Image (tube, rainbow, N blue to C red):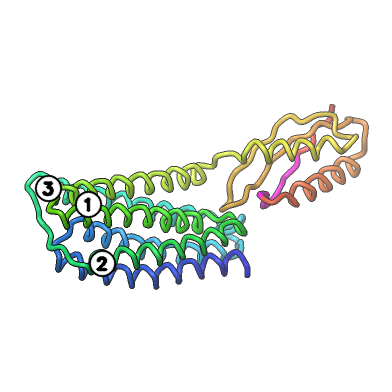
Amino acid sequence: MTREDSIKRVGIVGITGNIFLLTIKFIIGFICHSQAMLADAANSAGDIFASFMTTIGNKIAKAPKDNDHNFGHGKAEYLFSMFISISMIFVAFKLLWDSANSLIFGSNFNFSVFLIVVCIITIIVKFSLFLYTRKLYKLHDSILIKSSMQDHKNDCIVTICTLVSIIFGLYGIYWVDGVVGIGISLWIFYSGSIIFLESYNVLMDTSVDETTKDMILELSHTYDNIKGIEEIASAPVGYKYIVFITICVDGNISTFQSHKLADDLENDIKKLDKIYDAIVHVNPV
């Protein structure tokens, strides 16, 4: 299965699972007046949007390069990840407001065994989705798959907290419901902020990691005719990078030899996992 097919499947599976969870959470939460369960339902609604954005972002990102986009459309993956993060932060603030009102002014919910059943179903579904996306993330190292994987893991924790608040409600301790709602909103905000910063860094053209830089330096040192490295610069194009490197060579070698050396180094650099393209500039010394 290709990287693009895996991301597409993650999006489709996520949409299907979260629509099911949203439906049962909202119905039971509304009937029982549980703020924590309604917060959990809103979280599932955000997950549907995130899965939808994953599918759309993947479709655009896999488009090949053209005259208007010389390095492809890979950054769409991070642009849509940023959309996901912004929606999560918006939902977090709305839930924080509603839960705080519930805690301050008081709100009792009607205990039902269905609240517990919904929590257990959610934990099972989300943990299964987490294991599935983690397997694909290890294969493809995609931020869209990573976002889904972390979201499924977070949802397991969130729903466990919801289950705790419901159990407290069984014994008449209703204030825990509002506290858990606040906790869920803060957790969603934190998760959204992490995704936002990671996407922002790529869109702002951060450099390739130091490990990859070291590998490029090691490659250059295998060439006897390269006397030194003046500069290594890089820019992200999706989940890979284009690398610009300036090498120093003996000024007495022929133009053909220096160009052949640059071409060979470019081809070697492009074999690295995180490299989309390489451009080598030659300076005589």
42 or 7: nearer the viewer: 42
Q: Earlier in the sequence, mark 2 or mark 3?
A: 2
Q: Would you name the residue on which mark 1 appears? A: 95
| Disc 3, SS | helix
Above or below 278: residue 226: above
Residue 278 within the magenta-colored segment of the rendering: yes
Label 2 is placed on what type of residue? Lys
Quadrant of the image containing the C terminus: top right
Location of residue 46 (image quadrant): bottom left
For marks 2 and 3, give the CA distance: 21 Å
- Which span of residues is magenta-colored? 274-280
Of tags 1 and 2, the one toward the viewer is 2
Label 3 is placed on what type of residue? Asn
Q: Would you name the residue on which mark 2 appears? A: 25
Above or below 133: residue 207: above
| Disc 2, SS | helix
Q: Position of residue 19 (x, y in %)?
A: 33, 71
Residue 261 within the magenta-colored segment of the rendering: no
Q: Residues within 10 Å of mark 3 (few under 14, many from 20)?
A: few
Dominant SS in magenta: strand
Q: Residue at x 46, y 64 (%)?
A: 129
Q: Position of residue 35 (x, y in %)?
A: 18, 56
Q: Would you name the residue on which mark 3 appears? A: 101
Q: Give the residue at the far left of this rendering.
A: 105
Quadrant of the image containing the N terminus: bottom right
86 or 203: nearer the viewer: 86
Label 1 is placed on what type of residue? Leu
Q: Residue at x 67, y 38 (%)?
A: 211
Above or below 198: residue 11: below
